[in-house]
Image (cartoon, rainbow, N blue to C red):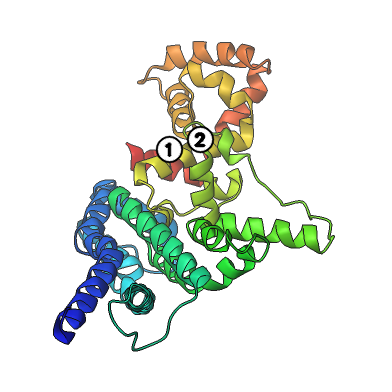
Amino acid sequence: MASTDEKVWLCVTLIFIGTFALVMPLIRYVTTGWKAKRKDIMDGLDAHARMCYFEMFSRSGATPAEADASKAFEQLYTQWYGRRFFLVPGLLLFAVGVIAVTVVTFTCLHRLGYMHNPLFDVPDIAMAALAGAYLWVLNDHISRARSLDFSPADVHWGVLRLIIAAPMGYAFAAIASKSLGPFVAFAVGAFPLEALTSMLRRLAEKNLNVAASPEETSDDIIKLQGINKPIVERLSKEDITSITQLAYCDPVRLAMRSNLTFNFIIDCMNQALAWLYLQEQLNTIRPLSLRGASEIKDLMDSIDDPAADHDGAVQALPKIAEAIKQDPVTLKLTLRQVAEDPYTIFLHRVWT
């Protein structure tokens, strides 16, 4: 028979392990992953590119000199996306995690006859739902820490997932048999929050006999090269749901918020700017070395500059027009608009 001290130490150990495992991915990201992500963004722009960024996107303030641009850029990153923003979400995750792990641990040990529960026993459905939510949050946070895709909002969503686990478990267990209730609650707890809300909405519409309203979807971003559904979903969380928004976004802030690499954001903007003018024709001229707005600017600069590959650019223009079945004169006007767009000029300066 275990002594009281041994029982207390066992409870403390189990609660510590369960809570530490939950917050460890966040601690790892804040201590090491955040620095790696910051370095990735900082290395994406040299001093000249950073000065170009301030000229383009910080017109209300004084543009720093090129020598001071690097320091000002690092201050901007720390001001808006510093590690301090993880403090409150991290404390919430710790508090909710301690409560969830404690009540489940005490309930399990009490039902095994190991010790008396000093709090209260959690019902089977609620305990299963909490276990499923714990599994999902821990798995999600481990994945995010590994891929350097962590933000304070992700921690908040993890906290929300734990808080609503029991109510959602009861809601879905109510439509299952009594014997399957705990299993359904656990399975539902392990679902992503977006999937849960979608399932709950469909069930409510079915039981209330309410016609489902069509969801607005924007699939045009996925037409760009290198964009897939997960990238579309990540951009939509940052309120980027159309090619126009992507073409005229602040690439640095979007990279900081979405945790996508800066070079990838720049490439997406490069394609989006050209897509605004050429639409599906961009797919036709891409094999002709015109992948986006920056490449179009290179072509127009070569046409305008006799010292560059002027003859080759002039000869290429009619072939490009022929490929998309457009008059060379009107095509030249279109490409000129793309090349002289202020955002194209910014991208070209940053890229080169």
Q: Type of residue at label 2?
A: Gln
Judging by the rendered image, the residue that carries numbered circle 2 is 271
Q: Whole-Å distance between the Cαs marked 1 and 2?
A: 6 Å
Q: Quadrant of the C terminus?
A: top left
Q: Depth check: 282 or 139 in front?
A: 139
Residue occupying the point 44% across, 42% down: 345
Q: Quadrant of the N terminus?
A: bottom left
Q: Depth check: 164 or 215 in front?
A: 164
Residue occupying the point 53% across, 49% down: 233
The kind of secondary structure element at disc 2 is helix
Judging by the rendered image, the residue that carries numbered circle 1 is 267
Q: Mark 2 and mark 1 in contact (Cβ < 8 Å)?
A: yes
With 168 as the anchor, is 312 left or right in this view? Answer: left
Find residue 82 and report its horizontal and vertical position in percent. Answer: 29, 68
Q: Depth check: 172 or 273 in front?
A: 172
Residue occupying the point 45% across, 20% down: 289
Q: Type of residue at label 1?
A: Asp
Residue 159 sits in quarter: bottom left
